[in-house]
Amino acid sequence: MVEKLNDKEAICISTLFIMGSSLIMGISGEAKNDAWLSAIIGILFSVPIILIYSRIVSLFQGKDLFEILEMVFGKYIGKFTALLYIGYAFLLGALVIRNFGEFVDTVGMPETPMFVMNLCMGLVCIIAVRLGVETIGRTCAYFIPIVFAVLVFIQILVIPQINLSYIKPMLYNGFLPVLEAGYFAFTFPFAETVILISVFFTLKTKKSARKVYLWGLSLAGLTITVLTIRNVLVLGKSIEIYYFPSYIVASDISVGNILQRLEVSVVFVFIVAAFVKASICLFAVCRGVQKLFNLSDYKSVTIQLGLLMIYFSYTIFHSIMDMRDWIEVYSYFAIPFQILIPIVLWIIAEIRKDVIMNISS
Amino acid sequence: MKKTIKIALLILLISLTSFFSVGCWNYREIDEMAIVSGIAVDKGINKKYLVTLEIVELTGGTDIKQLPRTVSTEGDSMFDAVRNEIAFIGKKAYFSHAKLVIVSQEVAREGIVKVIDWFSRDTETRENIYLLVSKNETAKEILEGKQITNEVLSFQLDKMLQNQESLEKAPSGDIRDFINNLSTEWACHVVPAISIENVNGERRPEIMGAAIFRTDKFLGFLDALDTQTMLFIQNKVRGGVIYSEEKIGDSYAILEIFKSKTKINPVIDVNNITMEVNINITAALDEVDGTANLLEGEGPKKLEQYFEDMLNNRAAKFVKEIQTKYGTDIFGFGEKLYEDESGFWKRIRNNWDEEFENLKVKVNTNIKIKNSAQLAKSLEMGD
Amino acid sequence: MPGSMVIIKLGDCMFGKDKKKKSGITNSEKSSNANKTKELGKSIEDNIDLVNSIFSNDETLIVRRFQNKFLKTAKCCIFYFEGMIDYEVVNESVIKPVLDNNLSQYISDNNLLEELQNKVLANNYVRAKKNINNVVDALVRGETVFFLDGYDEALIIKINGWKKRAVSEPESERVVRGPREGFIESVETNLVLIRRRIKTPEFKTKFREIGERTRTKVCICYIDDIVSKSILSELERRLDEINIDGILDSGYIQELIRDEPFSFFETVGYSERPDVVVSRLLEGRIAIIVDGSPAVLTVPFILLEHAQSNEDYYNNYILATFNRLIRTTATISSMTIPAVYLAVVTYHQEMLPTPVLLSLSASRQGVPFPTSLSFFIMLLIFDVLRETGARMPLSTGQAINIVGALVLGEAAINAKLVSAPVVVITALSGILTLLNSRLLTPIIFLRFFLLLAASVLGLYGVIFGFMIIILHLASMRSFGVPYLLGVTRIMHHDGQDAWIRAPWWTMTLRPKIIAARNLVRETVGKNRRR
């Protein structure tokens, strides 16, 4: 059975994928109370690169990232870059799982070993990937109204805690830190959508890719920006000192004496978003391994790779402090995957598209 | 089929094993926890801190009774002291529902960062619990004092603090606010003060006035009136009353505040800063303890004028006092400058304390008396 | 009974029409291969012996010999099984005409049997069969077999006349407003109930027999210009693949043709009400009527049909939407409430408002068992009570209820075996289950599953469990149609009749169920707009 994603499901996937762990980690805390500006800058940065991604998807409709790499770069370089992308997706998936594990370990259940949480999350991802992209898409379509309902609900309830003066002064430390934080926001989470190229071969039409990418970016970008503004308005410039600002904001809610301590709703949203991101990464890894070794079905390697990813997520950092430092390293680490290779790929593809198409068909 | 059964059995086995082996990580029954309602922190005799916990004990059955009891333990850090408590009550203390922390003056003077750090770092404790400073010698005696009703004292105090808005005799604010202010250049904070007093042979806690902190170190107390003035300047008044200091005509008048809005407007003239504080109050004449007719003719105008002058003088005097006595910016002028005049603020922020001491503050109060409660006139007494 | 005559007639016509269409070997023909060697002879005595020998030791097989008054050579006999025919009709339409008519006037024609069939036997279904297997099949189906001396053919006359239940309102699907008719155990009657509501030649029926021994009549019916051909052929394929000894209820078929055989959720729907089945037929679904079962199956079946009730369509749409939301919320809650409660009180006490925490804590003082264990036990006890209530005679059932309520509720709390909130939550969850009894299986098991997850990982466990359930549901299909169809699309016409019941004037399109992905796109085309 050939899996097909309709546009709505694909938009849901890309929205939740972008929201992923940034929902709870918050983005551009480095910019303090200008974090929301950085978020907007990050979104603006990512528009061109996302157009490139969508162009790649629609140029090679029905082909996934790894096939495209091989078609454009030839067998050896193609395989090598495919290997790099497998590694990248693997790392990204492990990071998301790890973020989740750290989150639960820090705010929820300090006595429960983190590995258990990682394992649970990973197992759900494995199940999802085995059930296929279409199932993930439908699940996303099912969860996305709940996710937005929860976010809006919290947004409304948090209004009494808002302090509008926290947003001032704008650009206190100058524009450079904001720009830098904007670049961080670009690498995490917006440009991570490069992984989605390995999923969107299931799109139905050529036009879908651009629509899906832009809708996903704008929905998720809007959400993240609104959340960041909210976090700034509630927490002020101390947004920087918290690992999980959104969680702290939700824990502040108190309406009457009954409706309070709604942290768990945030947890729900986070689990859903992180689950989608991690399973898409796992899917990309499996798909890549399948193409690399010419396997007949990616499902045969899902469990093994999934378990490896869980274990990797457990050993990747020493502690939550390392995780925080990593974000800075990551923003440079990600350059080849998010910017260099896609742009080279795109340019070659545009120049030689007739040749490439002839060879492949 | 055989394979399916095998897989099903395997899953069952794994889940059962995990169920029985992990059932105790974070799982805890609510009756096995000692629910802490309030915490008092004092200087210890042998160790650094003496922590007193007020614990709610419950009797089950159809008739639920809450029996508060207090437990004191010593430790070199908050965490140390709190963990030592297990030896006394046998149950693990549970802090998520704690409502307030009372700190003794002695501890507060040495700096309370170590106390509140634990609250914001630990997962179980919450940051939105109230922080109070005891006016009495120790914080412990407040929790141990006799409660007003049969209820748990901390819960009672919690309600009092929540209703503080209609009283405005003490500031409100939780540990989160405190921490947020710590990282700023002005870094001062006011927290409510609490004392326990003998009234008619009954020991009764009273939340009145405020304690001033510079960074995390306690400097001194403000009385209730000063606290109100401070709150007016900080734009934190939501209700409460204003008493006239002297007789107007032949009686004292009391205003009930409905709305109060304060705008601080920094006026910068090269290097001189003047803070213009505009207080707009909408109030009602609530109580007149005499027969003077304050509402006839020019009465309301005069009344407004009187109160405006009174508040202006009071505020000016109070600001001066703070500037000279404590030299700390409890009003948030620095914050205002940071927000509105960030370029200027950058230049002066390193010697803000000096700047503050020389700051010119112009208070301009505007009171509007919208009605006189339910009576059109003062009560008339037959001669 | 004129009514029953009509019923039989209609059924027969359709049966006959279908026989001609059908190709290939049916189950019944395969099964009687053993008798193939024996052929019908010309002598009536040989034939009687032959039939008797096939049905030896069966005393309910009756043979009645008779002769025409006028033509002595016209010796004939009928075979039938006792109680399975309508005696009066047999007497009037078979025995009497053959006895009384002057058959000698037909003797000139060379085929007396054909003359009898055409001119004498006053019955609407008479077929001549040469094969002994057909004779045997007809007999076991309750038809009457007519032999005439000198002919190696038998006439099969259909005069079934066993007792049927009257058409009445089904116990399991009562309504306040709406038709009171319900299906009964006879496939013919059920078809009449449906056909009376659909007056179009596009309404088609296809018959087949399933079950090696029971040879149960199974009827597939659909509306030809709405139905999706791919779903239809898939259904027929699955029905053809069934290889089973006997079908006693449509439940057998339901289980044998379903997708996702290991899922708790049903992918084949059923109803005992003709109006419900007809409304589903009008949406392009296919109904499967099984003889001997008042429950008519419909495919494809999606999750949200659980939330639909026929009364939704007869009542005001606002009330219907409200009721539907209640039903869905209740179902979700009955599954999750115990788990969420358990997670909150044992893992996330900080979520409770302080007064609630205090009273819950007080209610647990002195209770020895952990909350998780007491939940498992109480829920099991609830299921035991439910099952006893269903199995017991009515009077005893009430006693059980009292024992259950008093002993297990009140006394257990007083004896401090369980805490009061646990009993309250169990009872609440149990009552909510009954609101949607069709979902009993998934609710019971998923409740335990979520409870287990909650006792290990708290609310995180509940969320993970919930996600696994959703993933499973999202991966499911019923005859190629996504099981969660309509769940996510409130504005779309698939969702107009899902969470809400939109007003009739807005429901201009059928659910796109037929045009689902991965199927040959056999859209309803010109009939899409009503």
Image (cartoon, grey):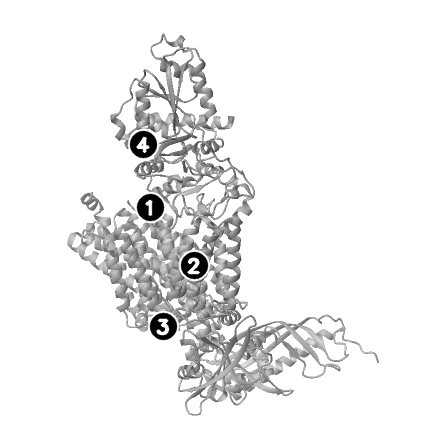
For the residues labelled 2 and 1, the Cα–Cα distance comes to: 54 Å
Mark 1 falls on what kind of element?
Answer: loop
The residue beneath circle 4 is C28
Give the label, 4 or 1, closer to the camera.
4
Q: Chain of mark 3?
A: A
The residue beneath circle 2 is C380
Location of residue B223 with respect to C195 vertically, above or below:
below
The residue beneath circle 1 is A207
Mark 3 falls on what kind of element?
Answer: loop
For the residues labelled 4 and 2, the Cα–Cα distance comes to: 45 Å
Are labels 4 and 2 on one chain? yes
What kind of residue is marked 3?
A: Glu
Whether the residues at callouts 4 and 2 have beta carbons within 8 Å, the answer is no
Front-most of residues C330 and B233 = C330
Lateral position of residue C415 relative to residue A191, left or right: right
Corner quadrant of residue C69: top left
Give the label, 2 or 1, closer to the camera.
2
Give the label, 3 or 2, closer to the camera.
2
Q: Chain of mark 4?
A: C
Whether the residues at callouts 3 and 2 have beta carbons within 8 Å, the answer is no
Whether the residues at callouts 2 and 1 have beta carbons within 8 Å, the answer is no
* Residue at position x 40%, y 48% in the image: C484
Residue sitting farthest toward the bottom? B45
